[in-house]
Structure formats: structure tokens, C-alpha cells
Image (cartoon, rainbow, N blue to C red):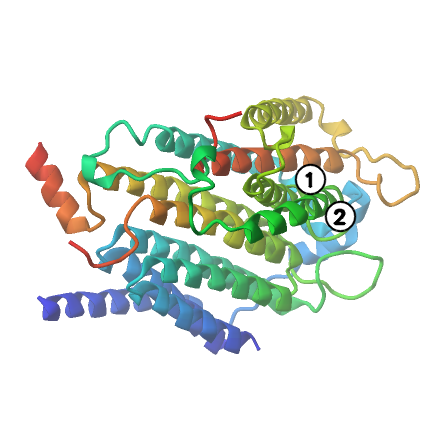
Amino acid sequence: MRKAKLLKVFLTIIIITLATFPIIMSNVSWPTFTRDYLFVNALNETGASNTVSSIYLGYRLMDTLGETLVLFVAITGTMSILLNLHKHELESVKTQSTLVPEKRVKNALRTNLVEVVASKLGPIILLFGLYVMLFGHISPGGGFQGGVIFASAIVFLVLATDVKTKITNSHVLERIEAISFISLILITTYVIFFPEGFFSTIDIGSSFLSAGIIILLNIIIGIKVGTSIAVMIIAMMGGKHDN
Amino acid sequence: MNILLLSLILCLSIFSLIAKDLLHAVIALSAISILSALLFTFLKAPDVAITEAAVGTGVSTIIYVWAIRHTKRKDGDK
Amino acid sequence: MIIERVLIFLIFITGFIGLIGVKNIIKKIIGLSLLNSSIVLLFILEASRIGDHAPILVGQEKNIVDPVPQALMLTAIVIGVCVTSLSLAMAVRLYKTTGSLDITIIKERIENES
């Protein structure tokens, strides 16, 4: 049995090596055509200093819309599986969720240190997430990155006990996610029908508002991604039934 | 420098498939994410570095720990 | 240059062997995530060979790295985390229904039940 498995592993390695051999041994240099074009024209056409942002929010916006849709479908599917886990389980594999408030004081591993540190670090990370989301066109960052940091900050705030605000309430977060998803679809539909107004830049002179529609897209994508991941993690910890 | 980081990532990936305790494997996966983010910074790609660091240690590790919490933690039981 | 590509190829092999050869479901999903990470590393490595500076234009005259593979890899990382999340939810559902995380035992128990 072990000899057959070892032979199969060896054969797999040989076949994959033969299939990827041209990639490893090739000496063809990477073409520089796109880099030259973008170096000259990207700042004038879109107004964003961050070239990567001007690609995935300017020249290839439909790919970003497809990726947001895939994220939405994946999070919806995961939540629909995880909220119905208790209906079909066997008797020997029952576990309980950890963040139900009646069980919090009885858990021996939850000490005071986690709650104090998490409640003090949460607002700082929230502010950092909003900074990364808003300044995505002139420094590294952008909508998706700021959204994930925003979701991490909400997880920190949920772990602290004496913070019961509206931002950790799962109903409020679901409504914000729905509004931002609908407005993202509306903005890209507007872009299909009026393409010459797409790259319009507001020429005020300061560097913050010089990118036009890219700032709006960053904010909307960031809020959508952040709130949907936060709702999924709050449901994983078991906090969906209270408040 | 790239070669050192890539060989560290290779060692950690072999460890994460051999480990008997599933929590050790998940922590190794999170360490692979952070080393990848450092490597992306050396390769002049700051956007990808922020995304990989935030996603690999924020979202992905939390989902794995949730999955281990609701199933078994040890590998190799019958 | 060739050494880095060989190391990335070895990470790809490790992920692939983990996906098909290991019996635990959660380790198979770890292998899938390793496959994704190795391809992202390969693209960013190839894009960094033609320049010296990060792709943020501040009015300098120097040459930047290629920004197109970086924009593609952002989407690839997002799709990777989506696939991981859905497959882990399905693995937990399989565990709750059959009581084991081993592929051969799950196959026996599902065949015995139907």
C-alpha cells in the first residue's frame, strides 16, 4: 500500500515538472509595452497617482465589479450554511458558540486582558482603515484593503464587553451593506451609458480631490466589503441572535 | 534576500501538511501570509503586500479557526 | 533567477500533493490555499524584473515596475479567500452529518446510509 502511494506521488511530480518545464527554463524577457504606456498616460487620463488603482478602478472597472459579485455570493453562501448547521447534526458532534453573552463569564480562558486591550485598540484600527480607504489614489491602499481592515476593527470591538454601539449591531451593518451594494451597481450602470463622463476629474488644485470618480468607488467598495465580512464573522462567533 | 524568504516559505508549507495538531498547521499558514507580504514589499508591490497581510492574517485565519473549533482539533483520530 | 522559480515550483508541488494525497479535509483545503499563494508569488516576481521603483507616480523620471500583474493579483487573492471560506463551510457541514474528517471514513458512512 505504501509502495503504490509513493509511486503515485513520484509520477505526479514527474508529470507536473514536464508540464511546467518551459516556464521555469524560459529566458524570454517580460514585455515593457504596458509599463511605458501607463507611465506616460495614467496620471493625465485618470488623475490617480497610484497606477494600480487607476488600472483596476479606471481601465478595468468591470473586472472589479465581477470580483465584488463573487465575494458577495461567497459570503452569502457561507452564511446560509453556517446559520443552518444545527438542524442536521448527529448527537455526538454538538458544539456551542462562544460569544453568547450568558456563557461569557463562565469561560475560563476569557480573562480581563483580552477585553481591555481589544476595547482600546479597536477605534485606532478603525481610523487606520478609514485612512487607507480614503487615500487609495495617492498612496498604496484602496477600497478593498481599507474594507478588510475595517472588518478587523469591528471584530476587535465585538470582543470587548462594554462597547455596545450601533456599529457592532448586525442589523445595522446588513442595511449599510445593502445600500452600498445597490449604489455600486447604479454607479457602474451609469458608467456604461455615459462613458465620456467617466474619467472626469475635479480640477481644484489640491491633491486629495483630483481623482474624480475613483474616490467615490473606493469608499463604496470599501464599505461594502468591510461590512459584509464583519457580518459574516459576527455570525461565526454566534452573536447574531442578540441585540 | 528573496531566496531566503522563499526557502522559509517552503519549509513552513511542508510543516503545515505534516503537523499532527491542526491549529499548528493554521498558524503556519498565517506565518506564510506574513512572509509573503514581506516578500511583496521587497519586490516593489505595496498594494499587493497590504492586501495579502490584511486578508491572510485577518479573514483567512479567523475562518480556519472557526472551522477547527466546530470540528476536531487533532489529525489522525478514527 | 532560476533558483527563485524552482523554489516557487516546489511550493506549488507541495500544495498539489497536499490536495490529493492527504486524508484530512482541512489539510486538503490548506493545500488549495498554498496553490493560490504560489501563483501570486510567481506573477509578482516576474513583474518586478523590469524596473526599480514602486508604481506610484510622484513626478519622477525613473522607471517603475509593471503594474498590470499587481492589479490582476489583487483579484486573485480575493477569489482565493472566497473559495477557502465556502469550502471550509462545506467541510464543517460534512463533519456534522457524518462525524468524521477522514475522506475514506466519510465515503463509507455515506454509502452505508444511502
Amino acid type, mark 2: Ala
Cα–Cα span, label 1 and label 2: 9 Å
**Which quadrant of the rendered structure holds the C terminus of chain C?**
top left
Q: Earlier in the sequence, mark 1 or mark 2?
A: 2
Chain to which mark 2 belongs? A
At x 39% / y 38%, what residue is drawn?
Answer: A97
Query: x, y percentage for residue C39?
Result: 46, 58
Q: Return the residue at label 1.
A: A58
- Camera-side residue: C80 or A239? A239
Q: Residue furthest right?
A: A205
**Residue at the image position 70 percent from the left and 53 percent from the top:** A140
Q: Residues within 10 Å of mark 1 (few under 14, many from 20)?
A: many
Q: Is residue A209 visible?
A: yes
- Residue bearing mark 2: A42
Amino acid at pointer 1: Gly
Q: Looking at the picture, does residue A88 appear above or below residue A2?
A: above
Callout 1 touching callout 2 (CB < 8 Å): yes
- Under circle 2, the secondary element is helix
Q: Are marks 1 and 2 on the same chain?
A: yes
Q: Position of residue A3 (x, y in %)?
A: 11, 71
